[in-house]
Structures are given as structure tokens and as C-alpha cells.
Image: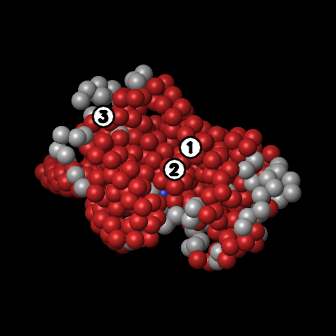
């Protein structure tokens, strides 16, 4: 076992998980606790990891110009990659038209939209970025607020001098190193966790509806594949001039984790480990770019928001949405992906924001279709989460390159 590389072990665990779930059906749920334990271990480190990584990273940027420059590049790249993803979703849904003439099976009408917690409005999301109490942001896992606090705290460390600054820098770096060590320990359990998670995902997915919404699912999967296999590698090559295969190979464990946990947040420790130890990006860059990316940069989710809303509109409206309305979908899909939490199915909840923007939020038919989408969401969520973290990792790598880091892809 020890001689087999981790990503092969994980792939084996995935295949085993699928076979196990197909053979033992509901009974296979007996192994689900393995996945739950693994997921809890990952979640356990997110809050301290985000705090220590961002604040130590920002504190090490001794001048505010460097922080400003990296910040600008990060936001620029995140915007560009998300918009490209949305445009793919927009184009494909208009060409394939998966929702036109679709009659959904009646069992999906039993969905109660109230059962999905309503997302905060976009204005509220921005205001709530500023925590009134940083500790409660940490306790409640309020990631945007925690990131905001970690950045300003790290920045304030750069403003003090002498032994106090040295002490805080040492403390933050030590905390970060300990978190990364813990991450590496947890990653050893990856194959076991993946086995439990995949088994549960396969055995609890509503396969009966797949046929009804097959075209919709294929449209999303096709779009995500184009983004993952063509657009992101191209962007990567364009900015870094490095063979994308090297990058994808280095990130294999993070892909598997994203795929099986459906959570960019839970995957963050693994993404950071791959980017720092396999790709060789400095802590200075990755500790800022990755936690931010896991929280706000979601290409897969952005594509999904756009394609999902167009799909819903095709099912319930006799005419396609006007060009103006589609432009509104593009903008709100981007904002919804920024606001979506890095947890399973968060993207589906945010779809109500985009629906609201084009006046379909209260349409009873829309809620019913969202119910059906929820029933088949798991495989789509697995895929879009993987796309989300791929984009984050590419961002970290190309920003590192642009900052003059030369030690990349040497391992
Ligand atoms: N599960 C996704 C993530 O954590 C968000 C989504 O539902 O699209 O990245």
C-alpha cells in the first residue's frame, strides 16, 4: 500500500466506493461514518488554517504595495476566470436548450422551497464581511468575515516594529506550520475518507430523475468539462508558460478531495498542501490567494448559476429570456458565485438570487424545478467543486510566477 502513490490509492478508493454502493445499495451506508469522520477532520482545521495562513502571509508582506499588487492580480484573475466560465454556461444552455419542452415528473412537485434556507442578499453579504466580533466570526465559520479580520490583523502586524512585531510574526508562522503539519497527517486518511464519501454519494443520489433532467445535467457537465479541460489549462499556459499537465498532476489529491467532499472549504487544507509542497508556491502567495479563492472564486458554481437559471427559464417561460435579461443573469451569476459558501450545494441555494434578478424568484414553477435540481445535485456539485478549486490553484500558481517565484514544478 505504502508504495502506491496517494492519488492512485484515492482513485482506487473511488472505484471501490462506487462498486460497493452499487452492490450493497442502502446497506452500503454502513461505511458512511468513515466519510463523515474525514470530513469533520478537514473542517476542524479550516478556521485556524484560514486565520494563521492569511494573517501570517499578510504580515510577511512588509510593504502595503506588495499586498495591493497581489490583491489586484488575485481579484483580476478571479474575475476573468469566473466570467469565462459563465460565458460557457450561457452559450451551451442557449445552444442545447435543455429546458425547452421539458415536462418534469410529478413526484418532484412535493418540494418545499422553504426547506432551503434563503440566501442573504448581495448587499448584506458585503456588509457582513466586516465582523462585529472576530471571535464569533471564527466560531460560526463565517469565512468572509474571518478573512477580512485576518487580513486587517496581518496588516496591523506589518505596522508595528521591534520585538512585538517579531513575536507576532513568529507566533503566526508557528501556528501556520502546525496547521500544515496537521493537514499532512489528515491527508494520509484520504483514501479511507474518499471511500466513505463516495459510497454515501452514490447510494443517496436520486437516480430515477436522471432521465428526466438528463439533458440539463449533460449541459452542465459538458460546460464544466470545457472549462476544466480547455479554458483553465489555456489560461494557465498563457500566464505561466508551463505545461498544464504538470499542474494537474500536482493537484491530483486536491481534485479527489474536492470531488468527494463537494466542499471547497473542506478541501482548502489539501489544496494548500499540494500548492506549497508539490507545486512549490511560496507561503507568502498561497496563504493569501487560496483561502480567498476557496471562499469567493468559484468558476464551476458561476457556470452552474447561469446555466441553471437559463434552464429554469426555458422550462417555465414560453419565450427565451431577452438579451438584457441574459446579461443580468451573467452579472448576478458572478455575484452569486462570489457569495456562495464553500460547502455542499451552496450554489443551488444561491440560484434564488439570480432568479430574483430576472423576476422568477417567486414563480411556483421555479421552486419545483429547483427541487428536482436538488435531487440530482450531488454529482454536479462534486464536479463544480473540483472546477472551483482548480481555478484557485491555477490562480495561486500564475500569481506566484508573476511575482518572480522560480522554484515551481521542480519536485
Ligand atoms: N460545493 C461548492 C463548493 O464548495 C459550492 C457549490 O455548491 O457550487 O465549492
Question: Which of the two labelled residues, at mark 2 and mark 1, occupies the earlier sequence position?
Answer: 1
Q: Position of residue 8 (x, y in %)?
A: 30, 42
Identify the residue position indicated by label 2 in the image: 384
Whether residue 373 is visible here, answered yes or no, is no
Q: Position of residue 184 (x, y in %)?
A: 21, 50
Label drawn at residue 373: none
- The answer to whether the residue bearing label 2 lies less than 8 angstroms from the nearest atom of ligand 1 is yes
Question: In the rendered structure, are the residues bearing label 2 and label 1 in contact, judged by CB atoms less than 8 Å apart?
Answer: yes
Q: Residue placed farthest to the front in the image?
A: 23
In whole angstroms, how far apart are the C-alphas of marks 2 and 1? 7 Å
Identify the residue position indicated by label 3 in the image: 279
Whether residue 182 is visible here, answered yes or no, is yes
Nearer to us: label 2 or label 3: 2
| Quarter assignment of residue 208 | bottom right
Classify 41 as above or below 293: below
Q: Position of residue 331 (x, y in %)?
A: 66, 49
| Quarter assignment of residue 189 | bottom left
Identify the residue position indicated by label 1 in the image: 224
Report the front residue among 311 and 394: 311
Amino acid at each position: 500500500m505504502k508504495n502506491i502513490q496517494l492519488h492512485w490509492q484515492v482513485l482506487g478508493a473511488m472505484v471501490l466506493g462506487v462498486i460497493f454502493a452499487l452492490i450493497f445499495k442502502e446497506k452500503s451506508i454502513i461505511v458512511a461514518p468513515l466519510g463523515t469522520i474525514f470530513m469533520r477532520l478537514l473542517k476542524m482545521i479550516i478556521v485556524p488554517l484560514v486565520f494563521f495562513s492569511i494573517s501570517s502571509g499578510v504580515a510577511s508582506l512588509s510593504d502595503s504595495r506588495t499586498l495591493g499588487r497581489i490583491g489586484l492580480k488575485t481579484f483580476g484573475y478571479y474575475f476573468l476566470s469566473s466570467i469565462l466560465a459563465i460565458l460557457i454556461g450561457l452559450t451551451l444552455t442557449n445552444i442545447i436548450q435543455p429546458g425547452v419542452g421539458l415536462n418534469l415528473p410529478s413526484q418532484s412537485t412535493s418540494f418545499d422551497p422553504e426547506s432551503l434556507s434563503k440566501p442573504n442578499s448581495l448587499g448584506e453579504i458585503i456588509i457582513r464581511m466586516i465582523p462585529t466580533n472576530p471571535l464569533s466570526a471564527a466560531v460560526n465559520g463565517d469565512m468572509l468575515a474571518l478573512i477580512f479580520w485576518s487580513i486587517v490583523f496581518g496588516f496591523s502586524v506589518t505596522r508595528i516594529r521591534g520585538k512585538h512585531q517579531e513575536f507576532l510574526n513568529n507566533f503566526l508562522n508557528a501556528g501556520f506550520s502546525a496547521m500544515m503539519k496537521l493537514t499532512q497527517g489528515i491527508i494520509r486518511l484520504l483514501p479511507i475518507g474518499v471511500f466513505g464519501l463516495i459510497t454515501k454519494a452514490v447510494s443517496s443520489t436520486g437516480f430515477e430523475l436522471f432521465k428526466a433532467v438528463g439533458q440539463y445535467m449533460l449541459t452542465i457537465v459538458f460546460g464544466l468539462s470545457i472549462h476544466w479541460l480547455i479554458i483553465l489549462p489555456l489560461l494557465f499556459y498563457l500566464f505561466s508558460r508551463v505545461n498544464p499537465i504538470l499542474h494537474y498532476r500536482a493537484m491530483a489529491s486536491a481534485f479527489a478531495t474536492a470531488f468527494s467532499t463537494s466542499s471547497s472549504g473542506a478541501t482548502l487544507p489539501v489544496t494548500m498542501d499540494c500548492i506549497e509542497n508539490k507545486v512549490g508556491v511560496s507561503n507568502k502567495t498561497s496563504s493569501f490567494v487560496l483561502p480567498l479563492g476557496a471562499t469567493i472564486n468559484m468558476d464551476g458554481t458561476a457556470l452552474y448559476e447561469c446555466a441553471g437559471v437559463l434552464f429554469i427559464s426555458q422550462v417555465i417561460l414560453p419565450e427565451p429570456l431577452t438579451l438584457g435579461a441574459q446579461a443580468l443573469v451573467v452579472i448576478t451569476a458572478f455575484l452569486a458565485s462570489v457569495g456562495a459558501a464553500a460547502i455542499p450545494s451552496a450554489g443551488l441555494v444561491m440560484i434564488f438570487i439570480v432568479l430574483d434578478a430576472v423576476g422568477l424568484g417567486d414563480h411556483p414553477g421555479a421552486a419545483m424545478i429547483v427541487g428536482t435540481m436538488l435531487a440530482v445535485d450531488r454529482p454536479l456539485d462534486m464536479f463544480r467543486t473540483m472546477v472551483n478549486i482548480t481555478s484557485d490553484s491555477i490562480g495561486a500558481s500564475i500569481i506566484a510566477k508573476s511575482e518572480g517565484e522560480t522554484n515551481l514544478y521542480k519536485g
